[in-house]
Image (spheres, helix red, strand yellow):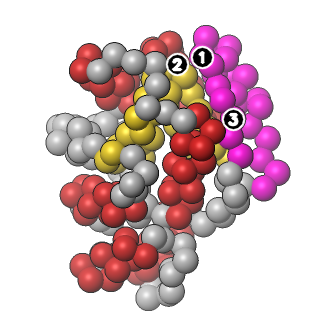
Amino acid sequence: MTVLFGGTFDPVHNGHVSAVRKIIDVLCPDRMIIMPARINPFKTGSVQCATALQRLEMCRLAFEGSGEVSDLEIHREGVSYTIDTLEALMACAPDEYYLAVGSDSLRSLPAWHRAEDIVRIANVVTVSRRCGEDLLPYARAIEDMGGKVTLITADPFEVSSTQLRWMLSNNEDAAGLIPDKVYDYIKKNRIYQ
Protein backbone atom coordinates (compact mmCIF):
# COMPACT_ATOMS: atom_id res chain seq x y z
CA MET A 1 0.00 0.00 0.00
CA THR A 2 1.23 3.49 -0.92
CA VAL A 3 -0.16 6.68 0.63
CA LEU A 4 0.18 9.98 -1.24
CA PHE A 5 -0.09 13.14 0.86
CA GLY A 6 0.08 16.28 -1.22
CA GLY A 7 -0.33 19.96 -0.57
CA THR A 8 1.09 23.40 -1.00
CA PHE A 9 2.82 23.30 2.42
CA ASP A 10 3.32 27.07 2.52
CA PRO A 11 4.58 26.56 5.20
CA VAL A 12 4.48 22.97 6.37
CA HIS A 13 3.35 22.90 10.00
CA ASN A 14 2.91 20.55 12.93
CA GLY A 15 -0.65 19.73 11.86
CA HIS A 16 0.72 18.26 8.62
CA VAL A 17 3.37 16.28 10.50
CA SER A 18 0.82 15.00 13.01
CA ALA A 19 -1.51 13.93 10.19
CA VAL A 20 1.24 11.94 8.46
CA ARG A 21 2.21 10.20 11.69
CA LYS A 22 -1.42 9.34 12.41
CA ILE A 23 -1.90 7.93 8.90
CA ILE A 24 1.21 5.80 9.30
CA ASP A 25 -0.01 4.55 12.71
CA VAL A 26 -3.47 3.64 11.41
CA LEU A 27 -2.78 2.36 7.88
CA CYS A 28 0.81 1.03 8.23
CA PRO A 29 1.60 1.77 4.56
CA ASP A 30 4.59 0.25 2.79
CA ARG A 31 5.31 3.67 1.36
CA MET A 32 4.38 7.20 2.45
CA ILE A 33 4.95 9.87 -0.21
CA ILE A 34 4.75 13.57 0.65
CA MET A 35 4.22 15.63 -2.50
CA PRO A 36 4.54 19.43 -2.44
CA ALA A 37 2.69 21.00 -5.37
CA ARG A 38 4.52 23.30 -7.75
CA ILE A 39 1.32 25.20 -8.51
CA ASN A 40 -1.86 24.39 -6.63
CA PRO A 41 -4.79 24.44 -9.10
CA PHE A 42 -6.96 26.19 -6.51
CA LYS A 43 -4.36 28.87 -5.79
CA THR A 44 -3.27 29.90 -9.30
CA GLY A 45 -4.29 33.51 -8.69
CA SER A 46 -2.46 33.86 -5.41
CA VAL A 47 1.17 34.66 -4.84
CA GLN A 48 3.28 31.91 -3.28
CA CYS A 49 5.15 33.27 -0.31
CA ALA A 50 7.84 30.59 -0.43
CA THR A 51 9.32 29.29 -3.65
CA ALA A 52 8.59 25.75 -4.76
CA LEU A 53 12.15 24.71 -3.90
CA GLN A 54 11.91 26.32 -0.45
CA ARG A 55 8.66 24.46 0.23
CA LEU A 56 10.29 21.23 -0.97
CA GLU A 57 13.19 21.76 1.44
CA MET A 58 10.82 22.61 4.30
CA CYS A 59 8.99 19.32 3.66
CA ARG A 60 12.26 17.40 3.64
CA LEU A 61 13.11 18.89 7.03
CA ALA A 62 9.62 18.35 8.49
CA PHE A 63 9.05 14.78 7.32
CA GLU A 64 12.54 13.38 7.83
CA GLY A 65 12.04 9.79 8.97
CA SER A 66 8.28 9.87 8.33
CA GLY A 67 8.18 9.18 4.61
CA GLU A 68 9.74 10.15 1.33
CA VAL A 69 9.36 13.68 0.00
CA SER A 70 8.94 13.68 -3.78
CA ASP A 71 9.86 16.50 -6.14
CA LEU A 72 7.74 15.07 -8.99
CA GLU A 73 5.21 17.93 -9.00
CA ILE A 74 7.83 20.59 -8.27
CA HIS A 75 9.59 19.76 -11.56
CA ARG A 76 6.39 19.40 -13.60
CA GLU A 77 5.44 22.39 -15.73
CA GLY A 78 2.11 24.07 -15.08
CA VAL A 79 -0.60 23.30 -12.57
CA SER A 80 -0.26 20.20 -10.38
CA TYR A 81 -3.29 17.99 -10.91
CA THR A 82 -3.59 15.07 -8.49
CA ILE A 83 -4.80 12.69 -11.19
CA ASP A 84 -1.66 13.31 -13.25
CA THR A 85 0.51 12.55 -10.22
CA LEU A 86 -1.41 9.39 -9.33
CA GLU A 87 -1.22 8.12 -12.91
CA ALA A 88 2.53 8.83 -13.06
CA LEU A 89 3.12 7.03 -9.76
CA MET A 90 1.00 4.04 -10.79
CA ALA A 91 2.86 3.75 -14.10
CA CYS A 92 6.19 3.56 -12.24
CA ALA A 93 5.10 1.59 -9.18
CA PRO A 94 1.73 -0.19 -9.44
CA ASP A 95 0.24 -0.60 -6.00
CA GLU A 96 -2.89 -0.01 -3.94
CA TYR A 97 -2.92 3.77 -3.57
CA TYR A 98 -4.48 5.92 -0.89
CA LEU A 99 -4.80 9.67 -1.36
CA ALA A 100 -4.48 11.45 1.98
CA VAL A 101 -6.31 14.78 2.17
CA GLY A 102 -7.18 17.21 4.92
CA SER A 103 -10.79 17.72 5.86
CA ASP A 104 -10.96 20.95 3.86
CA SER A 105 -9.80 19.08 0.76
CA LEU A 106 -12.30 16.29 1.34
CA ARG A 107 -15.07 18.88 1.02
CA SER A 108 -13.77 20.16 -2.31
CA LEU A 109 -12.57 16.87 -3.83
CA PRO A 110 -15.66 16.34 -6.03
CA ALA A 111 -14.73 19.61 -7.83
CA TRP A 112 -11.13 18.52 -8.53
CA HIS A 113 -9.92 17.90 -12.07
CA ARG A 114 -11.03 14.36 -13.07
CA ALA A 115 -12.30 13.64 -9.55
CA GLU A 116 -14.10 10.48 -10.69
CA ASP A 117 -10.82 9.05 -11.97
CA ILE A 118 -9.04 9.97 -8.73
CA VAL A 119 -11.49 8.04 -6.56
CA ARG A 120 -11.52 5.16 -9.04
CA ILE A 121 -7.77 4.55 -8.79
CA ALA A 122 -7.10 5.65 -5.19
CA ASN A 123 -8.87 5.21 -1.89
CA VAL A 124 -9.26 8.46 0.01
CA VAL A 125 -8.09 8.86 3.57
CA THR A 126 -8.80 12.06 5.43
CA VAL A 127 -7.52 13.34 8.72
CA SER A 128 -9.75 15.64 10.73
CA ARG A 129 -7.86 18.08 12.92
CA ARG A 130 -10.77 20.22 14.06
CA CYS A 131 -12.93 19.52 17.10
CA GLY A 132 -16.49 18.47 16.38
CA GLU A 133 -16.04 18.30 12.62
CA ASP A 134 -18.66 16.16 10.85
CA LEU A 135 -17.09 14.75 7.69
CA LEU A 136 -19.64 12.00 7.01
CA PRO A 137 -21.64 14.01 4.43
CA TYR A 138 -18.45 14.72 2.47
CA ALA A 139 -17.31 11.11 2.71
CA ARG A 140 -20.72 10.02 1.41
CA ALA A 141 -20.36 12.37 -1.57
CA ILE A 142 -17.07 10.63 -2.46
CA GLU A 143 -18.66 7.22 -1.97
CA ASP A 144 -21.54 8.28 -4.25
CA MET A 145 -18.88 8.87 -6.92
CA GLY A 146 -17.71 5.26 -6.47
CA GLY A 147 -14.86 5.99 -4.08
CA LYS A 148 -13.87 4.58 -0.72
CA VAL A 149 -13.12 6.89 2.22
CA THR A 150 -11.31 6.19 5.48
CA LEU A 151 -11.80 8.81 8.21
CA ILE A 152 -9.05 9.29 10.80
CA THR A 153 -9.17 11.69 13.73
CA ALA A 154 -5.95 13.35 14.89
CA ASP A 155 -5.21 15.81 17.65
CA PRO A 156 -6.79 19.20 16.95
CA PHE A 157 -4.61 21.72 15.11
CA GLU A 158 -6.57 24.89 14.48
CA VAL A 159 -3.87 27.05 12.87
CA SER A 160 -3.68 27.16 9.06
CA SER A 161 -0.71 27.86 6.80
CA THR A 162 -2.38 31.17 5.90
CA GLN A 163 -2.45 32.19 9.57
CA LEU A 164 1.17 31.08 10.00
CA ARG A 165 2.30 33.16 7.01
CA TRP A 166 0.59 36.17 8.58
CA MET A 167 2.22 35.50 11.95
CA LEU A 168 5.67 35.09 10.38
CA SER A 169 5.31 38.20 8.20
CA ASN A 170 4.42 40.17 11.36
CA ASN A 171 7.34 38.73 13.35
CA GLU A 172 5.03 36.86 15.72
CA ASP A 173 6.36 33.78 17.45
CA ALA A 174 5.31 30.57 15.69
CA ALA A 175 7.45 28.22 17.78
CA GLY A 176 5.57 25.04 18.59
CA LEU A 177 3.36 25.41 15.52
CA ILE A 178 6.06 24.64 12.96
CA PRO A 179 8.69 21.88 13.25
CA ASP A 180 11.85 23.30 14.82
CA LYS A 181 14.10 22.58 11.81
CA VAL A 182 11.57 24.22 9.48
CA TYR A 183 11.20 27.23 11.77
CA ASP A 184 14.98 27.67 11.84
CA TYR A 185 15.11 27.38 8.03
CA ILE A 186 12.36 30.00 7.64
CA LYS A 187 14.12 32.45 9.97
CA LYS A 188 17.56 31.85 8.44
CA ASN A 189 16.26 32.42 4.90
CA ARG A 190 13.91 35.25 5.88
CA ILE A 191 10.93 33.58 4.22
CA TYR A 192 7.57 35.32 4.72
CA GLN A 193 9.24 38.62 5.66
Would residue 75 be found to the left or right of residue 168 on screen?
left
Residue 39 shows up from this direction: no
Horizontal and vertical percent position of residue 174: 51, 80
- Label 2 is placed on what type of residue? Val
Horizontal and vertical percent position of residue 192: 35, 75
Quadrant of residue 86 within the rendered picture: top left
Q: Which residue is mark 3?
A: 151
**Looking at the figure, which quarter contains the C terminus?**
bottom left
82 vs 54: above or below: above
Horizontal and vertical percent position of residue 55: 30, 59
Q: Nearer the viewer, residue 166 or 54?
A: 54
Q: Nearer the viewer, mark 3 or mark 2?
A: 3
Whole-number angstrom distance, CA of label 1 to CA of label 3: 13 Å
Q: Inspect the magenta stretch and tell me whether residue 136 lies in it.
A: yes
Q: Inspect the magenta stretch and tell me whether residue 21 lies in it.
A: no
The residue located at (61%, 11%) in the rendering is: 146
Horizontal and vertical percent position of residue 158: 66, 63
Classify mark 3: helix, strand or loop: strand
Q: Are the two marked residues, 2 and 1, in contact with CB atoms closer than 8 angstroms?
A: yes
Q: Which mark is residue 147?
A: 1
- Label 3 is placed on what type of residue? Leu
Residues in magenta, as a range: 131-153
Which of the two labelled residues, at mark 2 and mark 1, occupies the earlier sequence position? 2
Q: Nearer the viewer, residue 77 or 100?
A: 100
Q: Which mark is residue 119?
A: 2
Classify mark 2: helix, strand or loop: helix
